[in-house]
Image: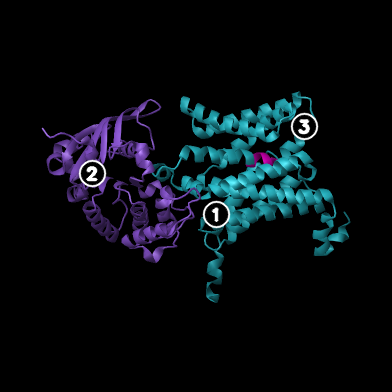
Chain colours: A cyan, B purple
């Protein structure tokens, strides 16, 4: 791209939109970001960051096998995602090994299996695009599948929004008043697996966990209201994706990495300047103007 | 001999055992409580107090024995919102982004529709409950900004809003201010008059003497159970606390 063309902000934004693949990438990444951002509030509050990392890595062999068999990749991802959590639970219960060790052990095992399968199974799977994402090259069937999964996750989270909040906050109370905690646990896990599989198209399997925890962590620093946290989380995820894609377009950088870096910068900004919980507490600085 | 009518018991736990992956946390425990009774649950850390609560709420499954709540199963007690659990302050995430109003509203979730949309009656129940614990000025305060006592009152309000007939309270007096302690003890008297049944765990021996009609001393199983005046003896307390002398427990600090 000609360097002079983004000297004006207008062309910086509009030029990429003339490309069909960029419009698609921006749309899909925003959708994926919204889904991951929504879920992110729950994962950060539940303390499931490591679980998110585990599930997102564990879906790898599922995606590969599904591609090889011609099945929807979401199905494979779902089976391996939930399977990994079941395995983690089983090993933890039946052995004396500590939980974080078991989590690390299981997801790296699954991930390694995925890498080995990619190298063995003859197919047109591009290891690079799975590992690092390829929002600029999403095929049409993936688009439909991604939209379907995204809507499904958003609808599920919307319906059970309050129950999931209660489950994260006080599962014992939920159980005491007859709310099905077992169902909510697996609902959250299911949404996590599905979000991981849509997220990996955007930023790749290695960085998808950032999509699942960074927006929530950013929002957590900015508000004391759960609903606001969800909104901020979703917005910061979408904005990061849009900015990240633009940056990667103009400076020819890896897209997934760019998106996650923008998210990280937004988090750092909140970490430093959040009104109440930031290091510099902007509220205090402006207190004199009230 | 008087014929026992099981319907009369709010809580009827018979020979219950709980184990976590083969490790026994509680065995052969019995407890019978009637409406309007306040029972203290006393034992060391790890003696099975929380496990006992968890068994009654159905949060853990019992491996042996039987629990009847108002003559019915724990499952149907959950459906009927019969039991409210008030956690100890350490048991909750105080940094969770949620307000006093939201927490108390959670007491109504079990009787709402699937979207948990509050009806007029739910809003009223929450308002009344918050008023009873004297937190009306803090409706939208995030729980992270509350004092320990205010937080405890928030969870009590949740139990009130739930309109439960059985209250399980885990260390209700730990880490609270004098004002909250006074308010809680006043509420206990009101609850008793309303016919609610209360089971509370405590480390404070004075509170047991003050509030509890009955006391249940446990150390993995029931050491002693009965009227506080009869059962709460130095000998029984010593046994419960694994041989530590009650002089030590009743020292100047308590």
- Is A16 in the magenta? no
Answer with mark 1 or mark 3, whichever residue precedes in sequence: 3
Disc 2 to disc 1, C-alpha distance:
39 Å
| Front residue (pair B102, A55) | B102
- Is A199 in the magenta? yes
Task: Give left or right: position of A187 versus A58.
Answer: left
**Residue A115 seen:** yes
Categorize mark 2 by other alpha carbons within 10 Å: few (<14), some (14-19), many (20+): many
Q: Secondary structure at mark 1?
A: helix
Tell me which corner region of the image, top left, top right, bottom left or bottom right, holds residue A275.
Answer: bottom right
| Front residue (pair B142, A154) | A154
Q: Position of residue A138 (x, y in %)?
A: 77, 42
Q: Quick one: which residue is furthest to the top in this view? A: A120
Give the chain of mark 3. Answer: A
Disc 1 to disc 3, C-alpha distance:
37 Å
Q: Secondary structure at mark 3?
A: loop
**Residue A139 seen:** no
Task: Give left or right: position of A76 versus B178.
Answer: right
Please tell me whether the stretch drawn in magenta is mainly helix, strand or loop: helix
Task: Give left or right: position of A188 versus A242.
Answer: left
Q: Residue at x 17, y 36 (%)?
A: B236
Viewer-nearest of discs 2 and 1: 2
Viewer-nearest of discs 1 and 3: 3
In the picture of the structure, the residue carrying the numbered disc 1 is A220
In the picture of the structure, the residue carrying the numbered disc 3 is A125
Q: Residue at x 36, y 39 (%)?
A: B76
Q: Position of residue B84 (x, y in %)?
A: 34, 47
Q: Bounds of the magenta span? A: A195-200
Task: Give left or right: position of A282 versus A259.
Answer: left
| Front residue (pair A84, B252) | A84
In the picture of the structure, the residue carrying the numbered disc 2 is B40
Q: Quadrant of the N terminus of chain B?
A: top left
């Amino acid at each position: 791209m000609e360097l002079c063309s983004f000297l004006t902000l207008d062309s910086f934004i509009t030029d990429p939109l003339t490309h069909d693949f960029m419009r698609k990438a921006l749309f899909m990444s925003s959708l994926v970001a919204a889904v991951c951002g929504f879920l992110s509030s729950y994962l950060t509050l539940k303390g499931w960051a490591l679980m998110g990392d585990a599930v997102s890595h564990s879906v790898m062999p599922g995606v590969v096998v599904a591609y090889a068999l011609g099945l929807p990749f979401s199905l494979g991802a779902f089976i391996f995602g939930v399977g990994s959590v079941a395995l983690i639970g089983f090993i933890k219960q039946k052995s004396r090994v500590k939980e974080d060790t078991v989590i690390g052990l299981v997801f790296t095992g699954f991930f390694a299996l995925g890498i080995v399968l990619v190298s063995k199974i003859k197919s047109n799977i591009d290891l690079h695009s799975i590992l690092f994402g390829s929002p600029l090259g999403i095929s049409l069937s993936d688009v439909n599948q991604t939209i379907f999964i995204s809507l499904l996750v958003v609808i599920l989270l919307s319906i059970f929004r309050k129950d999931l909040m209660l489950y994260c906050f006080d599962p014992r109370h939920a159980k005491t008043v007859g709310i099905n905690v077992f169902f909510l646990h697996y609902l959250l896990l299911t949404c996590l697996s599905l979000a991981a599989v849509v997220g990996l198209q955007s930023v790749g399997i290695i960085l998808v966990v950032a999509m699942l925890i960074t927006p929530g962590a950013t929002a957590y620093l900015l508000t004391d209201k759960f609903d606001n946290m969800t909104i901020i989380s979703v917005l910061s995820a979408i904005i990061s994706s849009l900015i990240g894609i633009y940056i990667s377009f103009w400076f020819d950088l890896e897209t997934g990495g760019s998106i996650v870096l923008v998210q990280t910068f937004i988090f750092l900004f909140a970490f430093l300047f959040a009104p109440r919980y930031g290091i510099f507490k902007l509220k205090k600085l402006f207190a004199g103007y009230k | 001999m008087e014929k026992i009518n099981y319907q009369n018991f709010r809580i009827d736990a018979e020979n219950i055992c709980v184990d976590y992956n083969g490790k026994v946390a509680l065995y052969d425990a019995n407890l019978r409580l009637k409406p309007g009774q306040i029972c203290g649950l006393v034992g060391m850390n790890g003696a099975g107090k929380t496990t006992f609560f968890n068994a009654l709420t159905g949060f853990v499954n019992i491996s042996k024995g039987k629990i009847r709540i108002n003559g019915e199963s724990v499952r149907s007690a959950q459906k009927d919102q019969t039991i409210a659990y008030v956690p100890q302050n350490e048991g909750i995430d105080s940094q969770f982004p949620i307000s006093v109003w939201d927490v108390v509203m959670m007491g109504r979730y079990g009787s709402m529709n699937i979207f948990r949309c509050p009806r007029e009656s739910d809003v009223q129940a929450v308002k009344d409950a918050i008023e009873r614990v004297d937190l009306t000025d803090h409706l939208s305060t995030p729980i992270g900004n509350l004092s320990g006592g205010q937080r405890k009152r928030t969870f009590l309000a949740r139990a009130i809003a739930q309109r439960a007939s059985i209250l399980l309270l885990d260390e209700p007096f730990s880490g609270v201010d004098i004002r909250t302690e006074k308010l809680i003890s006043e509420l206990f008297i009101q609850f008793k008059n309303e016919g609610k049944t209360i089971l509370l765990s405590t480390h404070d021996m004075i509170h047991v003497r003050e509030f509890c009609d009955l006391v249940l001393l446990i150390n993995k199983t029931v050491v002693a159970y009965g009227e506080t005046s009869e059962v709460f003896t130095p000998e029984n307390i010593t046994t419960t606390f694994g041989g530590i002398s009650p002089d030590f427990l009743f020292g100047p600090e308590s």
